[in-house]
Amino acid sequence: MRLLENLASASLYEGAVVAKNFTAAFYAEPAKYSYFSGCSQGGRQGMALAQRYPDLFDGIAAAAPAINWNSLFVGGTYANFLMNLYGMYPPSCEVEALTAAAIEACDGLDGVVDGILSDPGACDFDPVNLVGTTIKCAAGPQANGSGNGSTTERKISLGAATIVQKTWDGPRRANNSRMWYGPGQEATLVGGIYPNVGGSLAPIGTNCSANSTCTLDPLVLFQEWIRFYVLKNPTADTSKLSLEEFEEIFDSSAREYRSMIDTSNPDLSAFRQAGGKLITYHGTADELIPFRGSVDYYQRVTKLDPNVHDFYRLFLAPGLYHCIGGPGPYPDTTFDSLVQWVENGVAPDSLLATSVGTDPIIQRPLCPYPQKQKFLKTLNGTENFICE
């Protein structure tokens, strides 16, 4: 348990103090300003510093933060749970076809067709409408999209549409009340963002044989949290859970670990009083950490402090995957904007974001929540988008 406490927060304080002492010793004077920057677990660490050690850093960039840890780590297994509950394991081609259809249906809602959903909340695409549609799939044994190079035809099943829809929506209890959030419709639900680890980071991961029989490829990162920390049984079988048992695991994780590692305390008054500045960006195509979790946290902070905009700003990044990648632009100006805010008092009205590995290169401003991008005229060019 001590190791988990170190991960949660203790090591952050100790590491910062040691680093500051080394810096002061090397330069014979302390640093004038101190900054922290991280994404995912690093983003959670940044939020932990703002919440627990508000005097340590002048500026914090906490991207796609893994806050609301217990909701995230148990809720993140929801698609795995659904597939086991229904006994349905859709091949990746069906899931990919439904994702592509959602993007195609809602792409133009922001005024420009570019493969990016600038306002995911406006997309009401229902995947059930595609049940029975014929698609092409890779033939032969498949592991999250691979095959033998040839193709075969199959129809989108009701099971695939149901699992995808419920995954987008996020976990719900038997009474239909929300437990947590799901990823956006443009998120990559199969294959994972890191190909070298395959489906272990895919929300809907399956392995399919040559005869199209598919089995679950579990999201290992989150499943192991349940086995090791919640059930305290590394060999526990989570493949036969009822909804009531899933709910109990969700609630048990929160009861035991929320105060230690959830990192979801909305009271940032001490950080504000210390003069700190905090910037978060979160991709709306993030499949691992739902961007709505960051929105939920920002809204809770705002309820406590209506002037939160003076020291903390959240920027949603349409089309961006987990931390980086995807069709949407990446805000590589985040740290520079943070420095300007801390040292010169210039708060960022937007973050300039540039796409990585796309042709053409896309540049757009990311807007401070709750503002949204508004398209003005022609494709590409930051001057064609405003925040309002």
Image (tube, rainbow, N blue to C red):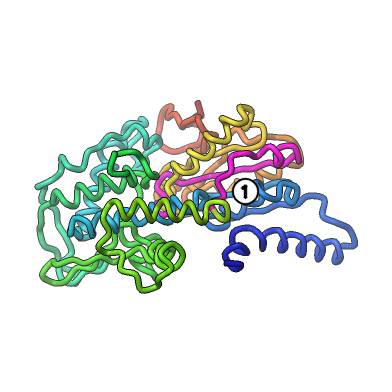
| Relative to 84, 317 lies left or right | right
As drawn, 47 above or below 230: above
Q: Residue shown at 68%/37% (left/top)?
A: 269
Tell me where residue 278 appears, x and y as whole percent.
64, 43
State the image quarter where residue 138 is shown: bottom left
Q: Nearer the viewer, residue 244 or 99?
A: 244
**Tag count in the figure?**
1
- Binning the other alpha carbons within 10 Å of mark 1 as few (below 14), some (14 to 19) or many (20 upward) gives many
Residue 215 makes an appearance in the image:
yes
Q: Residue shown at 9%/47% (left/top)?
A: 132
Residue 358 makes an appearance in the image:
no
Tell me where residue 247 appears, x and y as whole percent.
35, 51
What's the residue type where badge 1 is placed? Ala
As drawn, 299 above or below 48: above
Tell me where residue 25 appears, x and y as whole percent.
86, 65
Q: Nearer the viewer, residue 87 or 165?
A: 87
Residue that badge 1 annotates: 61
| Relative to 351, 26 lies left or right | right
| Relative to 349, 180 lies left or right | left
Quadrant in the picture for the N terminus:
bottom right
Tell me where residue 51 appears, x and y as whole percent.
65, 46
As drawn, 102 above or below 239: above
Tell me the SS state at disc 1: strand
Q: Residue shown at 71%/63% (left/top)?
A: 15
As drawn, 366 above or below 207: above
| Relative to 190, 221 lies left or right | right
Residue furthest right as drawn: 28
In magenta stretch: residue 277: yes
Q: Which segment did they paint magenta?
A: 262-288
Q: Residue shown at 70%/50% (left/top)?
A: 53
